[in-house]
Image (tube, rainbow, N blue to C red):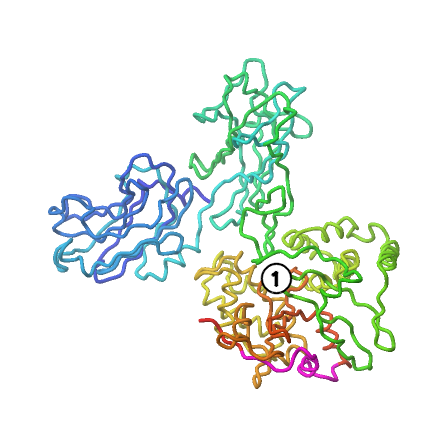
Amino acid sequence: MGVQDYSFLRDVHVEFKDFEVTNRLSLCFWFYLNDASALPSTILHQEHPDVTSHAPFLLLDEKKKILLFPSLISNCSNVTSWREVAHATSECAFPTKKWVHVGCEVTQDLLHLYFDGKIVGEKSLASSLTNDTGPVNSRISLTCISGKDSQLDGYVHNPELFPVVSTIKNHYVKDPPVQLSIDNSSAYEIEEDSDGVWSIVGGKASCRRNFSLDVTLMDNFSRPVTEEAEVIASLVYSDNETPVEKPVDADAPLLTSYDGIEYASSDRPNRIISGRASFKLKISQLSSKCDNRLFRIRFEIPKMGKYPFFEVLSRPIRCISRIRSTRATSLMLRKSSLGIHLLNGSQSPVLEDGSSDLPCIVHEAKLSPSSKRVKLGQEKLCANFKDVQQPNGGSRSHSWTSEDNYAYQNSLVARPVSQDGAENFSSDSEDSEATNSAIDDLPNDSGPISDLVVFKYCLADLNERRLLLKEMTMTAKEELATFAERVSLFSGCSHHRFQISISKRLIEEGIKCWNLISNNHHHVLWENLVSGLQEHFLKMTFGRTRSLTLQDFNLLRRVSGCQDLVSQDNFEKLWCWLYPVAFTVSQKCISSLWGSTSPMWIEGFITKEEAESSLRNLVALQEPGTFILRFPTSRSWPHPDAGNLVITYVGNDYTIHHRLLSHEFIYSSGAKGTAIKSMQDMLLEQPELRRLGRVVRSQ
């Protein structure tokens, strides 16, 4: 994070020798455009001692699009406008006040322009060499690319020249720049008006209130900077960013509190630790006393100089003497501690409703409603399968739950079965009374995990549950098991037990897997991730099952949204889906299904649509009883049904149905001393299942 790592655009000077047009040139650098008022303007130009006029190498046009030009031509004096020369143009406008990685690939017959590792502009020069730039042999070698004559207010980080294009993506992930930002989700005691202006109560000492705000120092991949630095907060006018004057014999405009004593904020810098600094501030100046002007708070790192990316301004602020009683359109901002990265513990912005403005860790097609007990008369939610026979001659009732319309409406609670095989359903009141009795038997706030946390987990959405489990993985394994039992009891859904029980291993194995594959980089190439995941999948399934295929990885890529460069967020999406599946495959009864090749009982990872399409023979459905096994692609940890097997089959009514095979049945079937019948035989014993279908994968 040294100042020497950053430079003004006008100070950039890249020299190279003996470069011929037959070679491949790759120039990479991080570019921060602070202001783009003078357009069009050259970003970088080419220099050569045999050419008097400078030719552009990168140019920002009137629409803020970047143009990449080929290397110098000897007859450049005949060119009336550089727009006549063949060039590559970016598809989108270049943003301001944001770091963007720029990659330039120049060859004899091709131009490629990259933003953040992706091609955004290209141009073939083969057909335009003669018309636009003269004969090929008139082109000459370059000596330097410079930004000294640029009129743009820009900054550059880590410019490098490479002979091959493959290094553009590697350069993108190697040494990203850092930037100071405000975490708006951390705002406390701040009201936001309908026009986006913050309202803060300030003024005289008896009226002004404390408000809180956090700033973060992170790299371009949202990773916190480990180095410590001091940040200073000051109050400025919103319109011209000049400091707010301190009145004579009055308090400083912006105050901070330490141990109950107020100081001028400029006299008490705050230290950034693990990429974050928290400020508790007060404003002593009212907007009404300053011609109703709006304020902003400027945060800056003094030791880093006046670089714009090492300072940040808050939203416009209106300082008032009291909160207005009616503010229908305003929103009170508050702190939230839930914005935690799954694998590295860094924080991400979380809004008041619990949602995040960053991509969610898990891709969900739709959220299912909260789990509830199935009441008497709701048997239609249950699958129509008969009880699965157990080795002791008894039966296990309701081993299957419905997945019709691809939404798990309810989770079933196992019920006792009488000697004659009849189900022993209790009444609603009896069921409720039994539940209340069981709850009463639990001690309040027993152990380190209180009832409040249990209720919070039961009522939380999927993302909040994931973050709560991440925090709980630091507790002992026994405490986590107790928590799983209590959640299952309070929620009435035993499926939660499995997801909670695997959370510790899931997170620990995920961290280990990512660190080994990424080698401490922020991004990895997809092909490198594939080889690493293949090895980990075989380890998780104890190496006794078949490996993943190309089609399996294609589905994993779709589930996680991975591109050629895979971020940690994408890896987390993939891991939260893959780990519960691998855990299920590792069970003996399912391992036999996964490992079977003749016939192939589980034909890899497929989507619901592929399963339904495979059961349709041209325009008609296959015969009733034809079924296919699959893992649901929209259920990721800690969803109660993540990693379960789903049976997609043609019913007697000639419609396609989906049934879920519960975790309890899978693990009880694979337990020691109970595996008298194979899973294949038990499936075919179901009257609705008669023959195994084949999967026709989508192209």
Quadrant for the C terminus, please: bottom left
427 falls in the magenta region:
no
516 left or right of 432?
left
Residue 16: which quarter of the image?
Answer: bottom left
Q: In the displayed image of the protein, which residue is found farthest to the top?
A: 248
21 displayed left or right of 208 = left
Query: Is the residue 431 above or below the residue 542 in the image?
Result: above
Using the rendered view, name the quadrant where residue 685 is placed. bottom right
| Horizontal and vertical percent position of residue 451 | 79, 50
Within 10 Å of disc 1 (Cα), the crowding (few <14, some 14-19, many 20+) is many
- Front residue of 645/301: it is 645
Residue shown at the point (48%, 76%) measured from the top left:
618
Classified by dominant secondary structure, the portion drawn in magenta counts as loop
Residue for badge 1: 636
SS at badge 1: loop
User: Horizontal placement of 341 versus 172: left or right?
Assistant: right
Residue 54 in the image: x percent, y percent?
Answer: 19, 44
Span of residues in magenta: 675-694
Q: Is residue 677 magenta?
A: yes
Amino acid on which disc 1 is placed:
Ser
**Whole-percent x and y of residue 265?**
57, 28
Relative horizontal placement of residue 436, taking residue 645 as reference (left or right): right
